[in-house]
Image (cartoon, grey):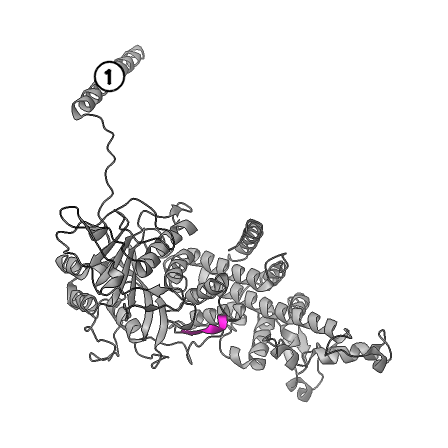
Amino acid sequence: MVNTDEQQFLNALDKKLWTSADKLRSTLDASQYKNTVLGLIFLKYVSDSFDSRRQELSAQFKNPEHEYYLDSADFGGADSAEYQAEINTELEQRDYYAETNVFWVPKVARWEFLQNQNKVVINGVIWLNRAGDVLTQAPEDDTEKRLCTRISSVGQLIDHALEAIEQDNAKLKGILNKRYTSLQIDPAKLGELIDLIATIPFKHASLSSKDILGHVYEYFLGQFALAEGKKGGQFYTPKSIVSLIVQMLEPFKGRVYDPAMGSGGFFVQSENFIREHQGRIGDVSIYGQEYNHTTWQLAAMNMVIRGIDFNFGKEPANTYTNDQHPDLRADFVMANPPFNMREWDTGVSDDDPRWVYGKPPSGNANFAWLQHLLYHLAPNGSLGLLLANGSMSSNTNNEGEIRKALIENDLVECMVALPGQLFTNTQIPACIWFLTKNKGQRTSASGKALRDRKGEILFIDARNLGYMKDRVLRDFTQDDLNKVTETFHNWQTVGWGDDYKDAGGKAMQGTIAESRTPTYDAETTVRPEREERAVEGQQYQDIRAFCKSATLVEIQKNDYVLTPGRYVGAADAVDDLEAFAEKMGRLTAQLKSQFEQSDNLEAEIKKNLAGLGYEV
């Protein structure tokens, strides 16, 4: 977790960057400006990583104890030009950078070069030879010109840098957004933006440069989502919701998949979760898909910034008609697809093998997403999917039958109702579906001993959690996230204790973990509903108005509706212990007094108006 000093540092950085950068976007809309800024942030990151490795190598070449040591005596002494030239030659050897997974950055893409040359091209032209050196004078004949590159604008300077990085790093091929020349931005403003991003301080006592830049990237994504409004949700899911799903699923090892990945928020948070819990990033494989080309590029840059290996398919593509991972069976599937998506099934066959539980309606893709995720889920896998609340109760166009089939096949594990105003792009109430193909007793990827949960579904009503971070948006605190997460994990692992009570109040022995289903009748058994917070490792308890573990029998009696409010109940009204007759007497006397005050005020106003010559 980020400590107070780190948070203050990052908050100050956020304020500085956004306030300054906001002055530069008057000529662009939010979506264009987003790509402009984030592309440069990416370029700054790879350049700084390269420079950091370069400085490290320079010290190693001069260190007699290191295997890369270059003895200055062999090159005319430590101060000789020959010795420095030899070091400079070695510093340009790509293998030194590849061995530490640092991207090779050609001369024309290094940040110092961009900062120096952007001021030149604002009012002039530069010529570069094939080595990336700036010529002191323009080529004189056509043959020489064909061997050189002419740069006449700041946008062209940036595009040329990005092209050079792509050419020298196969993994980046096709993911960089090389459109700065076509944006028609005022060259002076683009130059200002380069100088602004250069001021990002990448040194802190406890934060690495990768952590700092990763934070900046995520902060800008959130700010741009706000600026873009409805369209912003296509690439950004609020961090608190992503964190909640990741905490509940605990993707410690295995294949992680998101078929509607946006800018890759679920993958980033999975990496953060693994690091915070001392796991190994190498134990997780990342798979994603995205239809929008620019957003696909953003996601790839987001992964590269953090050093996460990924497979986003050969190209941006429609998940339904051009599945980039047809044979994938993932251990963890997480997604926030567009809510209530219409006309999604053009080109999709009615007998598509993914529609195991029923053909989803053309007018709404909610149950298409659910079944697509299930299709790609491994036998012991788990998934978390954000959907509109209508998915929990709708019976139109076969949706009710599909939901019934999912429940009858014991695939639904947990339903979480979310509060409103969590999203930048929609006010549609949302929920999270958690499904698994195996509710049996087993050990999870995180090492938890899961009990047998067959025939049960956990309902959590989180609508009263969170706080208003501003006039428009609600957010979760870490305590809110922990409350939901720990309730879910306690239910998965510890289950009910020996305090079931029958209709006569007699305690029933045994736990659910000891049998396939609870040994009680849903109509006669009263389960304890204690107003206490679940803590990690405690036995799970139903809490009125917050959580309830329901059986298939109870869900059938509710017509297979999965809205948590139907099961958790309402909070008990607070009794003030005042007798009804006494309360009515007190309130009536108070009302009489208020009427008398009103009459007196009315008489006083009429008197004053009469004094002015106005009779009422």
Counting labels gives 1
Residue 504: give x, y in percent of width and height: 13, 46
Residue 329: give x, y in percent of width and height: 34, 77
Q: From where the camera sits, is residue 309 visible? A: yes
Magenta region includes residue 286? yes
Q: Write down the quadrant of residue 552 in the picture.
A: bottom left
Most common secondary structure along the magenta stretch: strand
5 lies left or right of 229: right
476 or 146: nearer the viewer: 476
165 or 325: nearer the viewer: 325
Q: From where the camera sits, is residue 394 visible? A: no
Highlighted magenta segment, given as a residue range: 281-288
Magenta region includes residue 513? no
Residue 439: give x, y in percent of width and height: 27, 67
Q: Label 1, on which residue? A: 593
Helix, strand or loop at label 1? It is: helix
In this rendering, the answer to whether 595 lies above or below 294 is above
Residue 392: give x, y in percent of width and height: 22, 60
561 lies left or right of 484: left
